[in-house]
C-alpha cells in the first residue's frame, strides 16, 4: 500500500460520489478485508459490497491481495491502494498555487459533494462569513485564528480576504504547535510565544493561522498546563483587541469527518448546518436583540414537564452573546460557526431541581431522554432512556468539578428550529435551553477542563418574574 494517492481523474471522483463506495474505501484504508467482513462492518449485503469492490478495483482505488478461507469459502481480500488520498481535481479553481492547501480525502470529499449535492457555493459562504457574519472591513487589522481543520473552507476565506485587500501570513503549523512547541516548551518560552503573537499585527494587516490554536483533548496532558496555555492565549488575544483598529477573531467551524463516514443522514444534517451557518446580518440582529433582552433577566424557572422544574439564578456580569458580528464577551472575541446563543455562568447556590433533557452528544455517541437531579449546581443523579450509557457513568464516577454545571444558555439561531444531532449546533436551536459542563473560563467563570459539552432540551417552558418568556420554541419578550 502506498502512502499517498492523488485523485485527479474526474471519473474516480464520480465513483466516489456513491457514499457506500466511499465508506467501503475508507474501511479498506484500515487494512485488508473480504466482502463478507466489509458487509458486516458496513451493514450491507455481501453481493452489494462485492459490486463496490469491483468498482474500486476497476478505477484503481483498491486492489485484490489474497484469497483465504472464510467460513468454508475461499474469499478474495482487498485493500486500498494508499493509506491516504488527496483530491486535486473537482474543486473549483484548484491550481498549482493551491496544492499546499489540498486537504485529506475526507475534507475534500466533503467540499466537493457539498457543492454537488447541496449546491453549496463555498466562495459565497466565505463572503457571508467575512462580510455579514464578521463584518470585516478592508482597512481593518484582523487577527484570525481557526480552531478546526477544514482547510479547504478556510482557503476560500483567505482568498476572499485577499480580494478585499487584506494581507495574511501563516506563522506556524499544526504539529509545531501541538507537539513540538506548547507541549514541551518551558512556561517562560510559552509566554514569549504568545507575546510575539500579540505583537504580530504591528507589521501585518491580517494574520491568518490556518491551523488550530487550541490544544487537543489528549490524555496525559497535565490540566495545570492546559489552564496555563489557555490563560496565555486569552491574554494574547486581549492584547491584540486593545490595539487601535484591530480585532482578534477566533473562528470555530466543526469538523464532520467521523459522522460523515458513518451517518446515513449526514447530507441532511450538513444542509441544516450550512443553512444555520449562513444566516445574514439582519437575521443575527434578531439574535442580538433577543440576547440583550434575555440578559435583563436574572432568575429563571425551567419547566420540562409537570415534575421537572429547575430553578436557577445567573451571574449577569459573566455571560457570552454568540451572535455573529454582534458577539460580545468580557473576555475575547470567539465566533463559533454557526452562532446563535447566549450563555451565562450560573450561581450554584439555589441552582436546584429535577429536569428532563432531550439530548447529549458525548464523544460522537448520543444519549437521549436524560433525567437529571441537581442540588446547588451539582448533578447528584443521572438516568438516560436510550443511547450511550457513558453519560450515566460519567456522572457516577466524576469528581465534584466534573459534575458541576458550568454554563446555562438559550438557543437563538433563527435558521435552525429542531434538533439535528450535530455538535455545536443543537445548543443553538431557536427556543432551546442547555446545560453545559466543563470549562467556563471564556465566560469569566472559574471552572476549567479539557472541553465543554452540552445537554439540550428542545422546547422548554421558561418563566421569569412570574411571566412566561419562552414556550414551545417561541420567545415572549
Image (cartoon, rainbow, N blue to C red):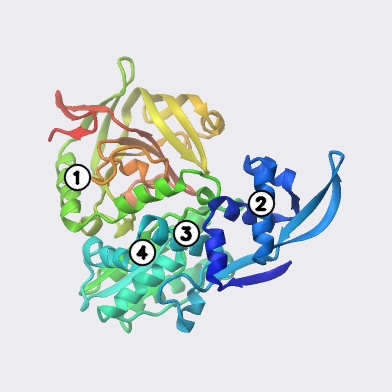
Question: Label 2's element?
Answer: helix
Seen at 32% across and 58% down, the residue is: 334
**Which residue was labeled with disc 3?**
110
**Which residue: 34% across, 54% down?**
274
Residue at the (28%, 79%) spot, across then down: 163
Circles 3, 2 touching at the beta carbon (< 8 Å): no
Q: Quadrant of the C terminus?
A: top left
Q: Are marks 3 and 1 in contact (CB under 8 Å)?
A: no
Q: How many angstroms separate mark 3 from mark 2 (CA)?
A: 23 Å
Q: Earlier in the sequence, mark 4 or mark 3?
A: 3
Name the residue carrying label 2: 51
Foreground label between 4 and 3: 3
Residue position for label 1: 291
Task: Tell which of 52 and 463 is nearer to you.
Answer: 52
CA gap between label 3 and label 1 equals 33 Å
Please give left or right for residue 354 compared with residue 140 in the image: right
State the image coordinates of residue 108 (x, y, percent, origin top left). Answer: 49, 65
Q: Position of residue 112 (x, y in %)?
A: 45, 63
Q: Locate the N terminus by quadrant.
A: bottom right
| Residue 51 in picture, x, y percent from top left | 66, 51
Q: Work out whether mark 3 precedes mark 1 in sequence or the reverse, and give the earlier one.
A: 3
The reply to whether the C-beta atoms of the residues labelled 1 and 4 are less than 8 Å apart is no
- Gap between marks 1 and 4, in whole Å? 26 Å
The numbered mark at residue 52 is: none
Q: CA distance from mark 1 to mark 2?
A: 53 Å
Label 1 or label 2, whichever lies nearer to me, is 2
Of the residues under marks 1 and 4, which one precedes in the sequence?
4
In the picture, measured across the screen, residue 413 lies left or right of residue 397, that is left
Q: Nearer the viewer, mark 2 or mark 4?
A: 2
User: Disc 4 to disc 3, how far (Cα)?
Assistant: 35 Å
Specify the quadrant of the image occupied by residue 353. Answer: top left
Amino acid at each position: 500500500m502506498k502512502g499517498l494517492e492523488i485523485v485527479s481523474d474526474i471519473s474516480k471522483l464520480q465513483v466516489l460520489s456513491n457514499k457506500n463506495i466511499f465508506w467501503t474505501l475508507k474501511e479498506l484504508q484500515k487494512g485488508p478485508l473480504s466482502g463478507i467482513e466489509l458487509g458486516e462492518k458496513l451493514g450491507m449485503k455481501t453481493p452489494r459490497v462485492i459490486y463496490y469492490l469491483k468498482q474500486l478495483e476497476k478505477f484503481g482505488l483498491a486492489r485484490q491481495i489474497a484469497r483465504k478461507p472464510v467460513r468454508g469459502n475461499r474469499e478474495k481480500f482487498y485493500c486500498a491502494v494508499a493509506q491516504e488520498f488527496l483530491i486535486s481535481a473537482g474543486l473549483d479553481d484548484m491550481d498549482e498555487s493551491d496544492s499546499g492547501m489540498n486537504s485529506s480525502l475526507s475534507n475534500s470529499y466533503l467540499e466537493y459533494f457539498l457543492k454537488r449535492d447541496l449546491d453549496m457555493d463555498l466562495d459565497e459562504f466565505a463572503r457571508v462569513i467575512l462580510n455579514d457574519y464578521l463584518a470585516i472591513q478592508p482597512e481593518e487589522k484582523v487577527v484570525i485564528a481557526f480552531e478546526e481543520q477544514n482547510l479547504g473552507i478556510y482557503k476560500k476565506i483567505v482568498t476572499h480576504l485577499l480580494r478585499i485587500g487584506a494581507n495574511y501570513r501563516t506563522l506556524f503549523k499544526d504539529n509545531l504547535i501541538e507537539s513540538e512547541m506548547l507541549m514541551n516548551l518551558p512556561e517562560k518560552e510559552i509566554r514569549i510565544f504568545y507575546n510575539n503573537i500579540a505583537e504580530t499585527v504591528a507589521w501585518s494587516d491580517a494574520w491568518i493561522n490556518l491551523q488550530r490554536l487550541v490544544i487537543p483533548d489528549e490524555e496525559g496532558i497535565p490540566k495545570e498546563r492546559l489552564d496555563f496555555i489557555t490563560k496565555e492565549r486569552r491574554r494574547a488575544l486581549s492584547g491584540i483587541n486593545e490595539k487601535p483598529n484591530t480585532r482578534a477573531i477566533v473562528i470555530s467551524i466543526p469538523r464532520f469527518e467521523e459522522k460523515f463516514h458513518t451517518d446515513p443522514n449526514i447530507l441532511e444534517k450538513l444542509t441544516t448546518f450550512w443553512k444555520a451557518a449562513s444566516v445574514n446580518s439582519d437575521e443575527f440582529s434578531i439574535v442580538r436583540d433577543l440576547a440583550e433582552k434575555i440578559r435583563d433577566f436574572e432568575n429563571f424557572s425551567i419547566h420540562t414537564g409537570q415534575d421537572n422544574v429547575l430553578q436557577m439564578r445567573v451571574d449577569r456580569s459573566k455571560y457570552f452573546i454568540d451572535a455573529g458580528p454582534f458577539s460580545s464577551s468580557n473576555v475575547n472575541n470567539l465566533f463559533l460557526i454557526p452562532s446563535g446563543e447566549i450563555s451565562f455562568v450560573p450561581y450554584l447556590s439555589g441552582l436546584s431541581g429535577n429536569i428532563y433533557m432531550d439530548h447529549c452528544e458525548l464523544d460522537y455517541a448520543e444519549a437521549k431522554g436524560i433525567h437529571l437531579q441537581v442540588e446547588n449546581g451539582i448533578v447528584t443523579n443521572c438516568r438516560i432512556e436510550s443511547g450511550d450509557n457513558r453519560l450515566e457513568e460519567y456522572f457516577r464516577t466524576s469528581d465534584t468539578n466534573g459534575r458541576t454545571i458550568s454554563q446555562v444558555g438559550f438557543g437563538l439561531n433563527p435558521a435552525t428550529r429542531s434538533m439535528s444531532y450535530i455538535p455545536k449546533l443543537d445548543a443553538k436551536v431557536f427556543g432551546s435551553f442547555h446545560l453545559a459542563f466543563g470549562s467556563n473560563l471564556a465566560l469569566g467563570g472559574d471552572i476549567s477542563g479539557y472541553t465543554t459539552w452540552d445537554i439540550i432540551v428542545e422546547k422548554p417552558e421558561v418563566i421569569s418574574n412570574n411571566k412566561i418568556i419562552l414556550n414551545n420554541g417561541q420567545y415572549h419578550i
